[in-house]
């Protein structure tokens, strides 16, 4: 697995942008959704409209185009949905009972921005799989691409997309570097989140199709951090954060 990370790093110059950004004219701001951020309250994250307003206000405050971040960030956000094994979502019946360790550790980088923002393929590849993961707090419309770089095969996952982007896809379809493959989705089609892209690198898909965990238990960090290396080795965005 380490060889794949090293291969990507060695060939960083080959990758094109996943989202359009001119760092000399446009800025990005780092978003903090960790447990340490006192502004991330239960009331905020359970209300998608208020949550969206909060995200937009942070981006606008810094006159930024995107808000970014979140790799291996332990987040309180996932308390909003039962799919992460939490016990305080608005749909939960037993709010005082925690049965098992919840999933709180984020495995991708999120790029928060306007719905409809185009998403580009960073490298040639094929469509591995796609799905509409239509649950509250889930990925919503999701695309997974498979790439080969030298003798290494790896995958990139794009979550919270526009549902229309899935309509003309076929498994095994060739994708060219720089091709528009998707757009940031609206809350009703992106798992009920403020518009953003979840971008993740996955080495071993573990036979999964159209879905792969984007959040893991803290106790599982060792495995998932190796199987899902820092997406910024492809995005190359975090050094532009102000």
Image (cartoon, rainbow, N blue to C red):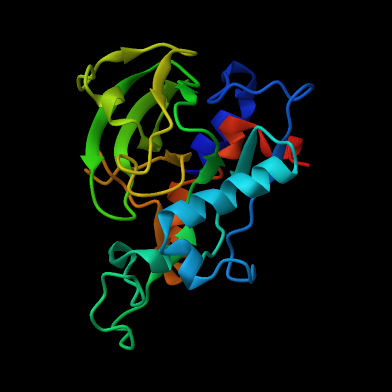
Q: How many numbered marks have been drawn onto this rendered protein structure?
A: 0
Please name whichever residue, 207 or 119, is drawn nearer the observer in this view of the structure: 119
Compared to residue 85, the image places residue 22 above or below, namely: above
Please name whichever residue, 31 or 229, is drawn nearer the observer in this view of the structure: 31
Name which residue lies at 43% across and 16% down.
180
Q: Position of residue 121 (x, y in %)?
A: 45, 20
Q: Position of residue 172 (x, y in %)?
A: 23, 19
Compared to residue 197, the image places residue 49 above or below, namely: below
In which quadrant of the rendered view does residue 167 lie?
Answer: top left
Q: Position of residue 152 (x, y in %)?
A: 43, 28
Q: Is residue 35 left or right of residue 102?
A: right
Q: Is residue 93 left or right of residue 100?
A: left
Name which residue lies at 66% across and 34% down.
237
In which quadrant of the rendered view does residue 61 lie?
Answer: top right
Please name whichever residue, 220 or 59, is drawn nearer the observer in this view of the structure: 59
Name which residue lies at 49% across and 26% down.
117
Q: Position of residue 74 (x, y in %)?
A: 54, 65
User: Which quarter of the figure is the C terminus placed in?
Assistant: top right
Furthest-bottom residue in view? 96
Q: Residue 143: tell me if it is visible.
A: yes
Name which residue lies at 61% across and 43% down.
68
Compared to residue 54, the image places residue 207 above or below, namely: above
Q: Residue 225: tell me if it is visible.
A: no
In which quadrant of the rendered view does residue 97 lie?
Answer: bottom left
């Amino acid at each position: 697995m380490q060889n794949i990370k090293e291969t990507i790093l060695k060939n960083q110059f080959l990758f094109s942008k996943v989202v359009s950004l001119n760092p000399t004219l446009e800025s990005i701001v780092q978003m903090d959704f960790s447990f340490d951020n006192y502004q991330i309250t239960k009331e905020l994250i359970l209300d998608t409209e208020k949550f969206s307003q909060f995200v937009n206000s942070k981006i606008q405050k810094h006159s930024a185009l995107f808000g970014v971040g979140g790799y291996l960030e332990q987040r309180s956000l996932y308390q909003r949905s039962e799919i992460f094994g939490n016990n305080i979502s608005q749909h939960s019946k037993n709010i005082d009972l925690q049965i098992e360790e919840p999933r709180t550790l984020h495995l991708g980088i999120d790029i928060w921005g306007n719905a409809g923002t185009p998403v580009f393929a960073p490298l040639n590849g094929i469509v591995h799989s796609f799905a509409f993961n239509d649950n509250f707090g889930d990925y919503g419309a999701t695309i997974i691409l498979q790439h080969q770089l030298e003798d290494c095969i790896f995958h990139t996952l794009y979550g919270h997309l526009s549902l229309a982007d899935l309509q003309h896809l076929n498994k095994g379809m060739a994708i060219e570097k720089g091709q528009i493959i998707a757009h940031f989705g609206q809350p009703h089609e992106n798992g009920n989140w403020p518009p953003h892209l979840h971008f993740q690198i996955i080495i071993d898909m573990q036979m999964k199709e159209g879905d792969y965990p984007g959040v893991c238990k803290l106790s599982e960090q060792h495995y998932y951090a190796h199987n899902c290396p820092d997406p910024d080795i492809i995005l190359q965005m975090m050094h532009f954060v102000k």
